[in-house]
Image (cartoon, rainbow, N blue to C red):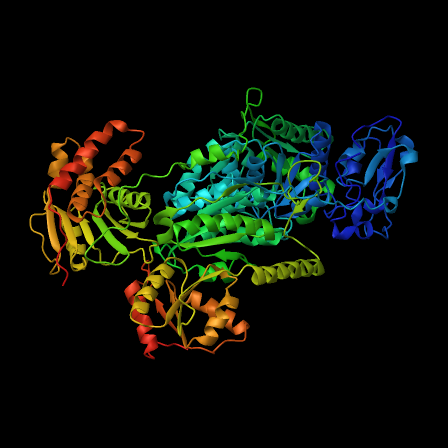
Amino acid sequence: MAHVDVREKPVLHEECCKGCGRCREACARGCIAPGADINELSGLVPIVLSLDACNGCGLCAEACPEPYGLEMAGPEAEREAAAVAPRARFVAPADVPDARVPLPHARPLVVKGTHASAIGALLAGCRHFFGYPITPSTEGAELMAKLLPALGGSFVQAPSEVAAVNMMYGAAGAGRRTMTFTSSPGFSLMLEGVSYLVGAELPTVFVNVMRAGPGLGNIGPEQSDLKLVCRGLGHGSTHAIVLAPATPQEMLDFTMLAFELAFRYRNPVVVAADGHLGQMTGKVELPRALVKPGLPGWAVSGDAAHRGNLHSSILLREADQEAHNLHLFDKYARMTAAEQRAEELRCEDADTVVVACGTPARMAAGAVTALRAEGVRVGLFRPQTVWPFPVAALLPLVRRARRIVVVEASDGQLEDELRLALSHAGAGGEVPIAHVRRHGGILPSQREIADGVRKAVAGRGVTA
Amino acid sequence: MSVFYERFERHDHAEGIKGRSTHYCPGCGHGLVHRYLAEAIEELGIQDRTIAVSPVGCSVFLYYYLDVGHTQAAHGRAPAVALGHKLSNPDSVVVSYQGDGDLASIGLTEILHAAQLGVPLSVVFVNNAIYGMTGGQTAPTTLIGQKTTTSPYGRDASMGQPLKMAELMAQLDGPVYVERVALFDAKQRVRASKAVKKGLKLQAEGKGFSFVEVLAECPTHLRMGAEEAERWVKEKMVPVFPLGVKKDVSATASWGAWHTPTYETGAVLEAIDARETEAQRFAKGFPETPFGGDELGLKFAGSGGDGAQTAAMLMVHAAVNEGLDATHIPSYGPESRGGTSYADVRIARSQVLSPDVPSPHALVAFNAPSLAKFGPSVAPGGIALYDRSVIREPHALPPGVRAVGVPLSEIAAELGQPLVKNVVAIGALLGATGIFPAETVLAVIRQALQKRPALVGVNAEAFARGARAVERGWGRAG
């Protein structure tokens, strides 16, 4: 349609003509008239050509907004739309696999949680960071800003969390590894984007260093985004694996794991750390290898092989949307089956099982150790994934135990996950559940936890 | 051969005539702008490189039509998505195709900041002065007096003035090329086609960010025929949105070179400051103390600038270098400078369990409020070390806690370096408790001051003076 030859004349594909008349305005020779007959394929009234006066100027075709409405062509090119064969179905190229490059042994780092996480991201092959400063997560972004230029990556301080998550959507769409650091109010702002990422199946890593809320709250540690990350990732039926680190070492390890899981399932992964863990410095051993990322076949990567790819979360036909959702639910089920993670401490003969994650789990570990010295048969079950909740490993403990004590820095959001998981597993109500909770930027202390366990053992403080 | 798909398979599965027909209403300007994009991509030979980011709005389905890579964005976020694509894959040619509600209302932040960043992107902004997909509501570009479903009596000034995006973009330093074009006659269509092509070419050649605003017809929601809508754009829109080049510095513009990510282990280890050599050990394992057990808790408390956090970090590094585990939790007041500054440090033989220190074995207090706040929590048999230069009378210490006053500030002042008072404190802490040999801490100080070796001497002296100022010994356990 770009080249206009004087020998060519306009050819009208009536079923594609919507009769708008833009061509009529463009024609200086009056060759085009409004039609009168409804086209039975389109239900619209196409224009009528009478080409006696046509000099083949092509202005009519230039004015036509339809790609295949009005074409300049010789008579031999005339053809029916129906004659166009469906093109060969696009087949995405094979994945270029990641490479694992061995690292020499290095002495442990002494770094804070956010830095450990940033280093984990770099070792996992992340070279593209988009974020917005928010305490107590910002040091992670600052380290990325410092280190990424030397590693040939890109760092953008976005104008908002909303922009940041959408920059991640673009980079992830290109098949690249991207992440952000944020904290509770910032993560709230990102949720629109998270829903789109889940819908479009784009792998991204969010490190949410949770602070006290609601609203601005304060910058002290809480675990009150667990409901959000487990049950409220934006609109629609969304889920993402939620990793709950408890040490700076796990901030590194779980950030690396988060990238692996994000790409394995083509889904966002959340690392839910509390404010203490973001700021806490500790000993961090480096892994044995770093990841040199490959390129997934689904990437929209600006090359011939990937040209047929599309990232989108819009499916107009209800049946298409339902099929896509069922595909997502199948993926959630696979995650639930394969990705439950937990650590146990002295659970082997425990008749009281303390359940805690994140930094409160360390206080709980201290309490369990102290209580064991007093002869109390207590153990700690520490979910390392909050979604999926590691119920498979918990069930045998629950069947043996006489009570559970949930320790957390929220209004029972971890306990709700636990109760829901037990209920789905058919073990709801089998064992009484007590709790120890602090709020507002204060974590339960070792002493409070020990007292809570003693009370529960004495039959007080049980809420179920 | 065209950049349009032969069949629009994504358009409702190409059922019926949909494989060859767009979803746009009769006379809609989008089809023409799509064609200019298709022609430009073909003529520039960039079909494989092109990634089109489609917005929310009528052109959400751009991906039905053009045979290029596609990413569909959330409402208003196309420039952010486009930036993510471009920065992570600079060889791609990324088009952010947006309507007026998307770009000028909900996505104003994204477009302004993307433009000001100046990263080579090609923005095509279709302005038809109304919301199409949601059914004819007021747009940020709706004209004064124009009736829409949400301005049924006509837009008046109280509903805001039409936003002139091309002029706004031209004010920014970031873009290299900004033009407004239209579609209402053959001459304008030629200009529009050229402008779209130029915007793409500037990116393909690595020149910079371009912004092409296209005044387009929405006959359906203007409730006009296509020809009348063309006249409306010419007679009503153009006076408010004058056509023409608003900015063009493309002749001299250049974005410069892109970086290529490296995954080379040496570069990564250097960046994260990892050391392949083991730290030298001076201690014989976990320190012997009257408390027994496998853990020690320390607290450093003062004002911002006292060096409490640095002192805490020195202790953590010392412990890790000795093969132990250690943690540090800082806590600050809201002030960037001068507020309260507390640090909890735990040292463990194998693994720190609870990292907080509600009842420290040793407290270092740099001022009276800190001593008053934390002194009562020191464990029986522990030490409360304080700056005697600023605290005359330690009080409220539990029985059995040893109070150790050291003139930290005065010693530091004598050394001519007031900032080293925290190192004097560490010297005194180790002098009193012996939890690590002096060499452990001195090695950490040398490591920390690797790039400022001139400061090692005064710090070593500060440590020594602190250590000499105290006698060895803990408190008396109850």
Depth check: B97 or A424 in front?
A424
Residue A301 seen anywhere in this rendered image of the structure: yes
Instruction: Say which residue appears at 64% left-offset and 51% top-offset.
Output: B133
Q: In which quarter of the image is residue A369?
A: bottom left
Counting from the top left corner in percent of width and height, residue B155 is at: 55, 47
Looking at this rendering, what residue extends furthest in the front direction?
B284
Q: Is residue A140 left or right of residue A306?
A: left
Depth check: B186 or A364 in front?
A364
Instruction: Say which residue appears at 30% left-offset and 41% top-offset.
Output: B281
Looking at this rendering, what residue extends furthest in the left direction?
B393
Residue B248 sits above or below residue B301 on the image: above
Instruction: Say which residue appears at 62% left-offset and 61% top-offset.
Output: A329
Counting from the top left corner in percent of width and height, residue B66 is at: 72, 40
In what quadrant of the picture does the C terminus of chain A appear? bottom left
Q: Is residue A47 left or right of residue A353?
A: right
In what quadrant of the picture does the N terminus of chain A appear? top right
Instruction: Say which residue appears at 79% left-offset and 47% top-offset.
Output: B19
Q: In which quarter of the image is residue A360?
A: bottom left
Residue B153 seen anywhere in this rendered image of the structure: no
Counting from the top left corner in percent of width and height, residue A438 is at: 33, 64
Depth check: B145 or B269 in front?
B269
Residue A454 sits above or below residue B353 on the image: below
